Image (cartoon, rainbow, N blue to C red):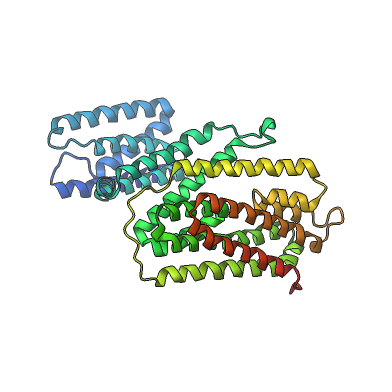
Amino acid sequence: MPFETDISGYVSALGIGLLIGLDRERKKAGVGTQSAGGLRTFALTSLTGAVAYDIGGIPLLAAATIAVVVLAAASYFPHAREQPGLTTEIAFVLTVLLGGLAMKEPVAAAALGVVATVLLATRSWLHDFARHALSEREIHDGLVLLTASLVILPLVPDQPIPQLLGLNPRSVWKVAVLVMAIGAAGHIAIRLLGAKVALPVVGFFSGFVSSTATIGAMGQRAKAHPEMLRSAVAAAALSTVATFVQLALVIGALSFEALQAMVPSIALGGFAALAYGGAFTWHALTSNEDPPEIKGRPFDPKTAIAFAAIVGVVQVLAALLKRAFGTAGLVVGAGAAGLVDAHAAAAAVAALVGQAGVTPAMAIVPILVGVTTNTVSKIVLAYTSGSREFAVRIIPGLLIVAAAAWVGAFLPSPF
């Protein structure tokens, strides 16, 4: 009979062992010791886990893991004073487990092996970053973000609450987490690139997640660091460019005819946002002001939570408008939805094109009403979350962008 077997798991396990072992071999050579495991030992450890799982399943893998723990402990204690770290010993245990995982999920095991090797190889950089680059406040805020996203978020109910007019608590808390995450991303980017370059880049890409949240986060940063006002305004304005890009994608996915009708409005609105954001970006890049190195808070949790609360109030207001006017009023419904998300309003209208007598031309006004009410939400949040100087600079840009989109409604589509 022909011999048929799948060796991909064994190949993955061997690769994991060799990869981790290569790093440990280099480390062993660097410190001039023979006590730490090297290339062969880690490769054999990973293969041990693979063979154990293949012939005995989880029970035998558990036994192999215990054996590795015993051997790692036996090699550690005689040299504990000279080498107090447990990194290599923990890597042994992880390697045998990854070898077993490779027999079931070779791709996931290989990915985890790469991550483990990166963590091992960047030891000096990580130690220096944690000890010298981060302040106590930054570490504290990082823990707050992790707690908010990994602990609290899964516990928040993920269903509409009738007593709150269908408000979904998890969606509101996601906004708070998003604002904190955008603030943290901007803080890290500033460290790497400098405020003049980093904030506009972060603002543009964060706009694809939520332009409203980005404006709130940038307003918060401009309020905390007035010397970064121009860059924060540029980031907030460029986030609206992402809004129009997403509008085109959402409308085109649901109704290509509606997208053709909306081309002038989307093009003019997006161009206005790009020009306004580009002007502030150029102003920030060419200014003589050199913002000092930022070592303050990446974000203010209280402000992020207040921002999310405002969004929740807007959602309840949208529900009240829908209840008062009913879903039959296309314009009113789109305007109510736009208070929360312009893309949701556009999607709701585009999905109706071709149904119930709704033509592509009839979809233009409701979609723009949704964009306009969403602009109102952005204006309110820009004023409440940021400084007066931030609001004075970003609000005219938001009004110009909305006006440009409405001007496009009166122009003929090129298609």
Residue 71 rendering spot, x and y as whole percentages = 24, 30
Residue placed at 48% from the left, 44% from the top?
303
- One can see residue 263 in this view: no
> Which of these two is toward me, 21 or 374?
374
Q: Residue furthest right?
A: 357
> Which of these two is toward me, 34 or 141?
141
Residue placed at 77% from the left, 50% from the top?
332
> Which of these two is toward me, 415 or 185?
185
Q: Is residue 159 left or right of residue 24?
A: right
Residue 328 rendering spot, x and y as whole percentages = 83, 47
Residue 129 rendering spot, x and y as whole percentages = 28, 49
Q: Quadrant of the C terminus?
A: bottom right
Q: In this view, does 206 lie above or below 11?
A: below
Residue placed at 62% from the left, 59% from the top?
246
Residue placed at 27% from the left, 51% from the top?
125
Q: In this view, does 94 lie to the left or right of 127?
A: right
Q: Residue furthest front?
A: 388
Q: In this view, does 59 lie to the left or right of 133?
A: right
Residue 391 rendering spot, x and y as whole percentages = 53, 58
